[in-house]
Image (tube, rainbow, N blue to C red):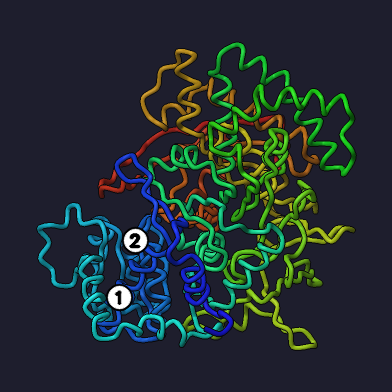
Amino acid sequence: MTKPETLAQHWLANVRRWRGTDKVAARQKDLGIWQPFTWDQEYQQVRDFSLGLVALGLQRGERVAIIGDNDLEYLWGVLGVMAAGGVVVGIFTDVTPKEVQYVVAHSDATFVLAGDQEQCDKLLAVQGELPLVRRVIYWDERGLWNYNNPWLMDFREVQALGRATLVDAPDRFEAMIAEGRGSDLAMFCYTSGTTGLPKGAMMSHANFVYVASAFDEVEQLRPTDNYVSFIPMAWIGGAALDLAPHCTHGIILNFAESPDTVQQNIREISPDTILYNSRLWENLVASIQVRMIDASWWNRALYRLFLPVGYRVAGYQLEGRQVPLLWRFLYALGRPAIFRPMLSQYGLHRARTAYTAGAALSPDVVRFFLALGLPLRQIYGSTEITGGAVAHRPGQIKVETLGVPLPGARVKIAPNGEILLTSPGLFVGYHKDPAATEAALYRDEEGVAWFRTGDAGLLDADGHLIYLDRLKDMIELGSGERYSPQYIEGRLKFSPYISHCMTVGDSSRGYVTALITIDYDNVGRWAEKRGLAYTTYTDLAQKPEVYALVRQAVEQVNATLPPAARVRKFVLMHKEFDADEGEMTRTRKLRRAFLAQRYADIVEALYDGRSEVQVSAAVHYRDGRVANINTTLRVESLNEVEAR
């Protein structure tokens, strides 16, 4: 085989490299036991499924949608589709039937892989609107035994078709892989759609191969590296940093027993590299803080004694200064006493690299983990740039920045302050939307295409990229001063008692306010420890004691902000922000315009002098039930605010 160009060709090169050995390609935990699969075994599973799809009529270039939790069959399915020259279309598992129908129909998918009964039911609900789909192939048959719809087909039945094909055409599988080119489409990744319907970003094999190679140059990926694959592969970060390195560098993918056991399974594997989105890192900080509140007096004492030492050492490292001998000695005592055991509770004690991607992460979170001895590094990019174009290099972390361009990538700031990115990872375009593709790109005088990120930023003297906020979200107050909502929100979410918040303020308003949702689990534990009775989320959120708790967190953040950016008033919301109700994207980004419109009366109450606001709202549960909430939300004022 000539030099590999596609993910499937790189994968096949690794198969040949480890053929006949016991080198592990992937593991799946099943019934409490980690089941390893060698490269030979993975090859057989992928080959059989790929040939089976072709026997069912899959043609090169056709799209195959997949919706399910990360596991072995998901991996085999993706690799099988790509080996046959098909294009994978990832769909998040928590979408509604209507959202499934949109992505499957818009992508012109001819087959759909569905993980279980829940996902099959979504597809069956919209079967009449998907005339191009020939089969829905499922791999977890539980609950589907009595389904007689011929549209549905078991994953193992497809593999049986592939084995039958193999008898007459033993060389067909590898011949199909050899036909691929780097410019071929590999995947459609649908954007989060904060301002409208998701767009299908078309990604080539060359895009993914580039990103894996760029991170290898920075990190030196090893075939012995263990990754726990749980970030959805429908998200570009999961595909670029799990699937692609598995194909190109042979990293070992480990799949959790179920979504509910991910944290436990990460602890068992103790991966060499870990990628969490920003919300998961924030949850982890909250979990550690709450765990220490409930810890024994001895562990609390160790934590209070050594955490300031960790922060001091982290400060020296961030400034690029040598750590004095005394602080190195104290840190050497604290690491085995508290830091390493704490990280091991979350399977992070062996992590060589820890990454965050997605929404902006508060510098406080980065500083906290660096104090514990875990260098948490930012990755910045977008779906359209194959996930990453900028990242912190080892030993070059700056908490206020996102890092420097990856090898082969470039970044520049447009005259209006917008961040522009280009690299070999630049996407092919949006499916069926050439106008949106053209609008997303800026072509310079040399004809180089740059992706318009829509983000505001600047470059520091060392070439590090500083992210400010979404360009459209940078807000100018009536006073003429500007502030970044995401920066404030990130600082507030460092509190273990705040799950989400949306800051508000514009040119017609003279100060910043916030809609805050409490972390129900953490605040609930806090309340129970103090004998504070409550019945529901709404009841707990409106307790005066909870308002005082959150007020303290807001005041702490305000003390670090310039006057114009300080939160003057806030309300604790009666419910969590919910992606199923359109309030957030599937990647947990706030849909600000929608939230501002939906909660317009609450926002007005923050500015018109009211001390409380009546709320009547419908809450939609996943089982289809709808409940109405009628309650009064208290408006908390942190100081006297002049009427504007």
Viewer can see residue 643: yes
Task: Name the residue at the front extreme.
Answer: 20
Q: Is residue 230 above or below residue 628?
A: below
Q: Residue, x 35% and y 45% (percent of image)?
A: 619
When asked about the image quadrant of residue 409, the answer is bottom right
Q: Secondary structure at mark 2?
A: helix
Choose between 328 and 64: the one closer to the eye: 328
Q: Is residue 53 above or below residue 154?
A: below
Instruction: Please report contact status of discs 2 and 1: CB closer than 8 Å, yes or no.
Output: no
Q: Residue, x 49% and y 37% (percent of image)?
A: 267
Q: Earlier in the sequence, mark 2 or mark 1?
A: 2
Q: Is residue 520 left or right of residue 400?
A: left
Residue type marked 1? Phe
Q: Residues within 10 Å of mark 1 (few under 14, many from 20)?
A: many
Q: State the separation of the CA atoms marked 2 and 1.
A: 15 Å
Q: Secondary structure at mark 1?
A: strand
Residue type marked 2? Glu
- x%, y% of residue 105? 34, 76
When asked about the image quadrant of residue 133, the answer is bottom left
Q: Is residue 596 above or below residue 265?
A: below
Residue 111: image tag: 1
Residue behind mark 2:
73
Q: Is residue 529 left or right of residue 373?
A: left
When asked about the image quadrant of residue 545, the answer is top right
- x%, y% of residue 275? 57, 51
- x%, y% of residue 79? 41, 70
Viewer can see residue 194: no
